[in-house]
Image (tube, rainbow, N blue to C red):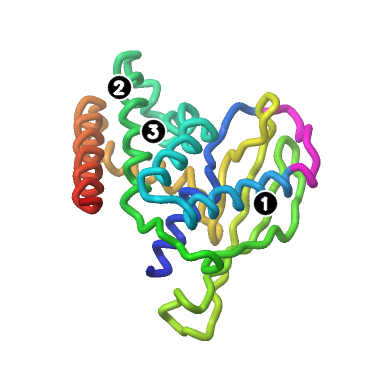
């Protein structure tokens, strides 16, 4: 598997980010934040290394839809265009966004041997309403196509908040690149190309999603 695929998988799964409502203070400890990241990482790696394809999709979809605040994510990535949508368009867009997000990860290679990807939780830094958890993701030499004797390391920073009784990820940075901002850039380009027309944008998003679903279906045959 190519290194860039691992990076994409890390972004999509190991983080399960984009959460949730805002808190006034970081009312959970650094130890809680560290444990959350460690437990979530183990859970996702276990799914990716131990389950069959259909079961893998089912479990990852469950994590996506239950552990990620997709409503917040969907609104954030269209930014200023959200206020231009009618209620009907918002509803249609949100359903498409969920399908698009789910279809996107299914196009990546999801079969990983145990031990190929590992990680460490290095430090936790509190700031106002958040805990910033700094991690290192390691890709072992077996899958490193650059140098079979060199272990690849990727720095990842999770921004965690307390949403009700749950800890969730608000954003993630991979080598200083924000996941939410990267998605916003992608969606803004589509909207710009569509001259800001929401209906055109929804048509394009629907077609992109259908294409992804067709590609995934073909790959599974």
Q: Is residue 45 left or right of residue 95?
A: right
Q: Is 75 in the magenta?
A: no
Q: Quadrant of residue 169?
A: top right
Residue 73 coordinates in the image, percent (x, y): 47, 34
How packed mark 1 is, by other alpha carbons closer than 10 Å (few <14, some 14-19, many 20 or more), is some
Where is 76 relative to 148, above or below? above
Q: Residues within 10 Å of mark 2 (few under 14, many from 20)?
A: few
In the rendering, at what x and y percent does residue 17 appear? 54, 42
Q: CA distance from mark 3 to mark 1?
A: 31 Å
| Eye-nearest disc, 2 or 1 | 1
Determine the secondary structure under disc 3: helix
Taking depth in this image into account, of 167 and 200 the one nearest to the observer is 167
Q: Residues within 10 Å of mark 3 (few under 14, many from 20)?
A: some
Circle 2 SS class: helix
Q: Quadrant of residue 196?
A: top left
Image position of 83 with respect to 131: above or below: above
Q: Nearer the viewer, residue 3 or 126?
A: 3
Chief SS of the magenta region: loop
Q: Is residue 126 left or right of residue 118?
A: right
Residue 60 horizontal/vertical position (percent)? 45, 42
Q: Determine the residue positioned at 47% across, 35% down.
A: 62
User: Which residue bears the numbered disc 1?
Assistant: 38
Q: CA distance from mark 3 to mark 2?
A: 14 Å
Q: Is residue 121 above or below residue 28?
A: below
Q: Disc 2 marks which residue?
A: 92
Which label belongs to residue 78?
3
Element class at badge 1:
helix
Locate the N terminus by quadrant. bottom left
Q: Looking at the image, is mark 2 or mark 1 earlier in the sequence?
A: 1
- Give the magenta-colored segment's residue range: 23-32
Of callouts 3 and 1, the N-terminal one: 1
């Amino acid at each position: 598997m190519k290194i860039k695929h691992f990076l994409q998988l890390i972004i999509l799964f190991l983080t399960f980010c984009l959460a949730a409502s805002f808190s006034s203070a970081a009312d959970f400890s650094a130890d809680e934040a560290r444990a959350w990241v460690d437990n979530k990482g183990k859970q996702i790696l276990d799914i990716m290394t131990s389950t069959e394809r259909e079961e893998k999709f089912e479990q990852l979809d469950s994590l996506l839809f239950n552990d990620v605040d997709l409503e917040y994510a969907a609104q954030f990535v269209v930014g200023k265009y959200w206020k231009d949508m009618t209620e009907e368009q918002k509803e249609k867009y949100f359903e498409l966004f969920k399908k698009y997000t789910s279809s996107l990860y299914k196009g990546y290679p999801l079969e990983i041997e145990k031990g190929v990807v590992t990680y460490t939780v290095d430090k936790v830094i509190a700031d106002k309403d958040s805990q910033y958890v700094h991690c290192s993701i390691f890709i072992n030499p077996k899958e490193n196509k650059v140098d079979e004797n060199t272990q690849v390391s990727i720095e990842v920073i999770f921004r965690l908040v307390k949403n009700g009784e749950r800890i969730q990820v608000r954003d993630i940075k991979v080598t200083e690149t924000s996941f939410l901002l990267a998605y916003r850039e992608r969606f803004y380009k589509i909207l710009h190309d569509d001259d800001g027309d929401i209906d055109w944008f929804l048509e394009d998003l629907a077609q992109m999603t259908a294409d992804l679903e067709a590609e995934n279906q073909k790959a599974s045959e």
